[in-house]
Each structure stands twice: as structure tokens, then as C-alpha cells.
Image: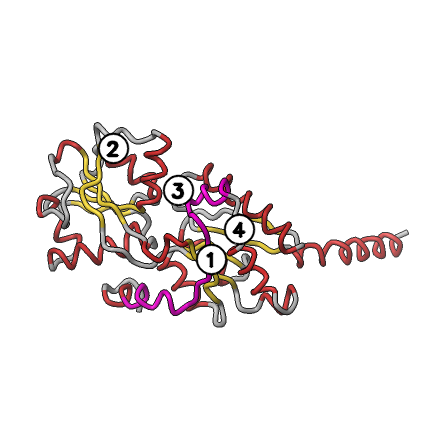
């Protein structure tokens, strides 16, 4: 009886293990409301499952650092990263590649927003009036919510954010930045323009309390990054199959959840400027 049970157990494991091993897992930086992220990326998982003919699963993570760690540890094989988190992840996993980006990600921008109590009006340059105010970034690992806003703050004032503002915080994500500035918890904030525009379209921003006061110059941002060893696990040419599936994603409803008009091919070299900026201001070595 014991031998029979052992054989049954071994047979069960043999049947289960290949299915687990064949599951293609991806994640994404948690840059917005969790409910919206789950809806968006479950749709992507369903789409990729059909295109790649493998089981595809989306797993959420708690923060940007966790997304990078999951990629490094091979808990996920693909990730929707921001510019900075993608640079960090690829540095940790030799052979990993940026394979696709939104068309809009080649010319991404950040918005600086202000609470109405500041009286600051929209300007073509970062207004001097932000000095001495309270300020919040998004996540510490965010390109559009931290890296590039900090770069432009330093460029405008020749000082670090801690010296420019009376208090500096980190909201954790772009949606939260809007809520904190809207509530007056912070007077100024910086965030991803796409999240602001999406929430404006949805009517979830009280424009009597908060408004955009400045838009940064454009830069490279989000991208899909894949581990370089996935061909060994899923078969030769799998990286190219994933890239093709992403670039051929044409469903307007699915693209609108990002929101992006389309995805286009990307390469690691596209993000050299992001890496250089992060090194310049000391975020990465």
C-alpha cells in the first residue's frame, strides 16, 4: 500500500511539474490603483496566452523594488517596467532585453501639479514659486514620478529637492500623488502624465482643488523587458514570439487600459539616457 501511494505521488508530481514549469509569468510596476492594474494585466495575460499558446499568468507586486526583485529571481520572466526600473532589472539579469514600448513612451513627460491654495499658475518653465512648498514624488523607483522630476528640479534650481522644498515625501504611486495634492497634504507633486490624463477623462480629479502647473521636456519611459534565458525554457525564438505578440496588440480597448495607442519594438540602447540620468543624480551607481 505504501509503495502504491509513493508511486501515485511521484506520478502526480511528474504530471504537475511540467505544467508549472511551462507557465509564463509576468508582473508590472504598481504605478496606479491596484484594481485598475489587475484589470489591465489580466487582459494582457489572456491575450498572451492565446498568442503564445502557453499558460500566461500575471502576478502583482507591492512596489517597484519587488518587481525588480521578482525579475532578478526568475519568479517572473517578463515585466512592464518604467525606464528606471527596467534599467535596474536588466543590470541584474545579464542577457535580459527591452523588447517593446508604447509609442507614447518615446516622448513621455511628467506633470507637476499644485494645490489651489498655492496660487501657482501654469508656466512654460518650472515656476520659482514652488520653492519652499511641500512636495511629493511618487515611488522612489519611478522614472516619471521621481527620476526625471528630480533631474529637472536640480536643473532649474541647482539644488537637491530637499533644499528646494520645505518637506519632501514619496506617495508610492501616481494616483496617490494626485490624492495627496488634491487633499492639500502636499502643496506640489510630480507624476506620470498618462495617469493624470486618464483620471481626468474618468472624472476622478477635483480640478477646483488641484491643477497642472508645468510639463517636463520629453524622455524615454515604460517598456516590456524579458529575461534572456526564456528561450531555453520555452523554446527557440520565444523572445521574438513575445515581442511580436506585444507589437501586434491592436485591441483598442486593451491598449486604452495602459493607455497607449500601440506598442513598438524597443531595445536596451533606447534607455541609455535614463541610465545616465540616474547615475548623474546618484540614484544608481
- Give the structural element (helix, strand or loop) at label 3: loop
Total tally of numbered discs in the picture: 4
Which percent across, then down, holds residue 118?
Answer: 12, 35
* Magenta span: 252-276
Disc 1 to disc 3, how far (Cα)?
A: 17 Å
Q: 4 left or right of 192? A: right
Sequence order check: which comes first, mark 2 or mark 1?
A: 2
The image quarter in which residue 203 lies: top left
Q: Is residue 93 magenta?
A: no
The image quarter in which residue 122 lies: top left
The residue at which mark 4 appears reads as 249
Disc 4 crowd, CA 10 A, few/some/many (<14, 14-19, 20+): some
* Residue sitting nearer the eye, 168 or 84: 84
The residue at which mark 2 appears reads as 182
Find residue 224 and name its label. 1
- Give the structural element (helix, strand or loop) at label 2: helix
Q: Residue at x 17, y 53 (%)?
A: 161
Which percent across, then down, holds residue 218?
Answer: 27, 56
Query: Which is closer to the viewer, label 3 or label 4?
Result: 4
Disc 2 to disc 1, how far (Cα)?
A: 31 Å
Disc 2 to disc 4, how far (Cα)?
A: 35 Å
Amino acid at each position: 500500500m505504501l509503495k502504491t501511494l509513493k508511486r501515485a505521488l511521484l506520478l502526480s508530481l511528474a504530471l504537475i511539474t511540467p505544467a508549472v514549469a511551462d507557465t509564463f509569468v509576468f508582473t508590472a510596476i504598481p504605478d496606479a490603483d491596484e484594481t485598475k492594474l489587475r484589470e489591465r494585466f489580466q487582459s494582457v495575460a489572456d491575450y498572451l496566452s492565446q498568442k503564445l499558446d502557453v499558460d500566461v499568468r500575471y502576478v502583482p507586486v507591492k512596489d517597484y523594488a519587488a518587481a525588480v526583485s521578482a525579475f532578478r529571481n526568475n519568479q517572473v520572466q517578463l515585466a512592464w517596467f518604467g525606464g528606471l526600473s527596467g534599467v535596474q532589472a536588466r543590470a541584474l539579469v545579464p542577457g535580459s532585453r527591452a523588447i517593446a514600448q508604447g509609442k507614447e513612451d518615446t516622448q513621455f513627460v511628467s506633470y507637476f501639479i499644485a494645490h489651489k491654495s498655492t496660487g501657482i499658475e501654469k508656466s512654460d518653465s518650472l515656476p520659482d514659486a514652488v520653492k519652499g512648498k511641500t512636495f511629493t514624488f511618487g515611488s522612489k523607483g519611478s522614472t516619471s514620478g521621481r527620476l526625471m522630476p528630480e533631474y529637472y528640479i536640480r536643473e532649474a534650481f541647482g539644488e537637491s529637492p530637499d533644499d528646494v522644498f520645505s518637506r519632501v515625501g514619496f506617495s508610492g504611486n501616481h494616483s496617490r500623488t494626485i490624492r495627496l495634492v488634491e487633499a492639500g497634504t502636499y502643496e506640489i507633486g510630480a507624476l506620470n502624465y498618462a495617469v493624470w490624463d486618464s483620471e481626468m477623462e474618468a472624472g476622478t480629479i477635483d480640478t477646483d482643488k488641484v491643477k497642472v502647473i508645468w510639463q517636463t521636456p520629453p524622455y524615454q519611459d515604460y517598456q516590456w523587458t524579458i529575461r534572456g534565458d526564456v528561450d531555453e525554457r520555452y523554446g527557440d525564438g520565444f523572445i521574438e514570439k513575445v515581442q511580436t505578440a506585444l507589437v501586434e496588440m491592436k485591441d483598442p480597448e486593451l491598449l486604452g487600459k495602459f493607455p497607449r495607442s500601440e506598442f513598438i519594438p524597443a531595445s536596451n540602447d533606447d534607455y541609455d539616457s535614463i541610465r545616465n540620468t540616474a547615475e548623474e543624480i546618484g540614484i544608481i551607481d
